Amino acid sequence: MKIKGTNLMVSVEHDIKIGNNDAIEATVVHQIHLFETEEEDNIGVEIDFGDVFNIKFLGIPIEKGYKAYRKFKSQMLELGIDIQTLIDEECVGILSNKDIEEVKNKFRKII
Protein backbone atom coordinates (compact mmCIF):
# COMPACT_ATOMS: atom_id res chain seq x y z
CA MET A 1 0.00 0.00 0.00
CA LYS A 2 1.22 3.47 -0.85
CA ILE A 3 -0.49 6.58 0.53
CA LYS A 4 -0.67 9.19 -2.20
CA GLY A 5 -2.06 12.12 -0.23
CA THR A 6 -3.72 13.26 2.94
CA ASN A 7 -7.14 14.87 3.30
CA LEU A 8 -8.99 16.21 6.31
CA MET A 9 -12.66 17.17 6.63
CA VAL A 10 -13.52 19.48 9.51
CA SER A 11 -17.03 20.59 10.46
CA VAL A 12 -17.47 23.92 12.21
CA GLU A 13 -20.63 25.39 13.74
CA HIS A 14 -21.69 29.01 14.17
CA ASP A 15 -24.78 30.41 15.83
CA ILE A 16 -26.42 33.12 13.74
CA LYS A 17 -29.29 35.57 14.11
CA ILE A 18 -31.07 36.92 11.04
CA GLY A 19 -34.11 38.92 10.05
CA ASN A 20 -35.64 42.01 11.58
CA ASN A 21 -34.67 42.31 15.23
CA ASP A 22 -32.84 38.97 14.94
CA ALA A 23 -36.20 37.19 14.80
CA ILE A 24 -34.64 33.97 13.50
CA GLU A 25 -31.88 32.11 15.31
CA ALA A 26 -30.09 29.04 13.98
CA THR A 27 -26.89 27.06 14.03
CA VAL A 28 -25.11 26.65 10.70
CA VAL A 29 -22.50 24.05 9.85
CA HIS A 30 -19.73 24.49 7.32
CA GLN A 31 -17.38 21.77 6.18
CA ILE A 32 -13.74 22.63 5.60
CA HIS A 33 -11.92 20.22 3.31
CA LEU A 34 -8.13 20.41 3.54
CA PHE A 35 -5.84 18.54 1.16
CA GLU A 36 -2.22 18.40 0.09
CA THR A 37 -1.25 20.27 -3.08
CA GLU A 38 1.95 20.76 -5.03
CA GLU A 39 1.73 24.54 -4.68
CA GLU A 40 3.94 26.66 -2.42
CA ASP A 41 1.63 26.57 0.62
CA ASN A 42 1.04 22.84 -0.06
CA ILE A 43 -2.40 22.90 1.59
CA GLY A 44 -5.59 23.46 -0.38
CA VAL A 45 -8.84 24.48 1.26
CA GLU A 46 -12.45 24.19 0.11
CA ILE A 47 -15.37 25.37 2.25
CA ASP A 48 -18.94 24.18 1.77
CA PHE A 49 -22.18 24.96 3.52
CA GLY A 50 -23.23 21.82 5.37
CA ASP A 51 -26.45 22.21 7.33
CA VAL A 52 -28.69 24.42 9.45
CA PHE A 53 -30.37 23.29 12.66
CA ASN A 54 -31.56 24.51 16.09
CA ILE A 55 -33.85 26.96 14.31
CA LYS A 56 -35.99 29.31 16.38
CA PHE A 57 -38.47 31.91 15.21
CA LEU A 58 -39.20 34.62 17.77
CA GLY A 59 -37.68 32.33 20.38
CA ILE A 60 -39.95 29.40 19.51
CA PRO A 61 -38.11 26.27 18.31
CA ILE A 62 -39.01 25.01 14.85
CA GLU A 63 -39.70 21.30 14.66
CA LYS A 64 -36.59 19.25 13.87
CA GLY A 65 -36.04 17.56 10.54
CA TYR A 66 -35.72 18.52 6.91
CA LYS A 67 -39.47 18.43 6.17
CA ALA A 68 -40.21 20.82 9.04
CA TYR A 69 -37.43 23.16 7.94
CA ARG A 70 -38.63 23.08 4.34
CA LYS A 71 -42.18 23.88 5.53
CA PHE A 72 -40.86 26.77 7.65
CA LYS A 73 -38.88 28.17 4.70
CA SER A 74 -41.96 27.90 2.48
CA GLN A 75 -44.19 29.67 5.01
CA MET A 76 -41.66 32.45 5.45
CA LEU A 77 -41.31 32.81 1.66
CA GLU A 78 -45.09 33.31 1.44
CA LEU A 79 -44.54 36.28 3.77
CA GLY A 80 -41.80 37.59 1.49
CA ILE A 81 -38.89 36.40 3.65
CA ASP A 82 -36.29 34.28 1.86
CA ILE A 83 -34.64 32.38 4.71
CA GLN A 84 -31.95 30.79 2.54
CA THR A 85 -30.83 34.14 1.15
CA LEU A 86 -30.68 35.60 4.67
CA ILE A 87 -28.61 32.63 5.86
CA ASP A 88 -26.30 32.86 2.85
CA GLU A 89 -25.76 36.59 3.45
CA GLU A 90 -25.07 36.06 7.16
CA CYS A 91 -22.53 33.34 6.39
CA VAL A 92 -20.40 35.49 4.07
CA GLY A 93 -17.07 35.81 5.84
CA ILE A 94 -18.23 33.80 8.85
CA LEU A 95 -14.94 31.89 8.64
CA SER A 96 -12.13 34.41 8.89
CA ASN A 97 -8.68 33.98 7.36
CA LYS A 98 -7.41 33.53 10.92
CA ASP A 99 -9.87 30.63 11.45
CA ILE A 100 -8.77 28.98 8.22
CA GLU A 101 -5.08 29.40 9.06
CA GLU A 102 -5.70 27.81 12.45
CA VAL A 103 -7.29 24.76 10.81
CA LYS A 104 -4.46 24.62 8.25
CA ASN A 105 -1.87 24.69 11.05
CA LYS A 106 -3.61 21.75 12.73
CA PHE A 107 -3.59 19.90 9.42
CA ARG A 108 0.15 20.57 9.02
CA LYS A 109 0.74 18.74 12.31
CA ILE A 110 -1.04 15.68 10.90
CA ILE A 111 0.78 15.46 7.58
Image (cartoon, grey):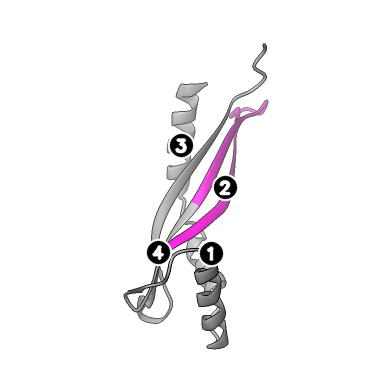
Secondary structure beneath dot 2 equals strand
What residue is shown with label 2?
47
What residue is shown with label 3?
103
Magenta-colored span: 30-54
**Mark closest to the chain's N terminus, 3 or 1:** 1
Secondary structure beneath dot 3 equals helix
**Mark closest to the chain's N terminus, 2 or 3:** 2
What residue is shown with label 1?
66
- Is 34 magenta? The answer is yes
**Amino acid at circle 4:** Ile
**In the drawing, does residue 79 fall left or right of residue 5?**
left
**Mark closest to the chain's N terminus, 4 or 2:** 4
**Whole-number angstrom distance, CA of label 1 to CA of label 4:** 19 Å
Q: Where is residue 16 in the image (x, y as percent from the top left)?
A: 40, 64
**Mark closest to the chain's N terminus, 1 or 2:** 2
Evaluate if marks 1 and 2 touch, with contact meaning CB atoms under 8 Å apart: no
Outermost residue on the bottom side: it is 79
**Whole-number angstrom distance, CA of label 1 to CA of label 2:** 22 Å
Which quarter of the figure is the N terminus placed in?
top right
Residue under the point 45% across and 23% down: 109
What residue is shown with label 4?
16
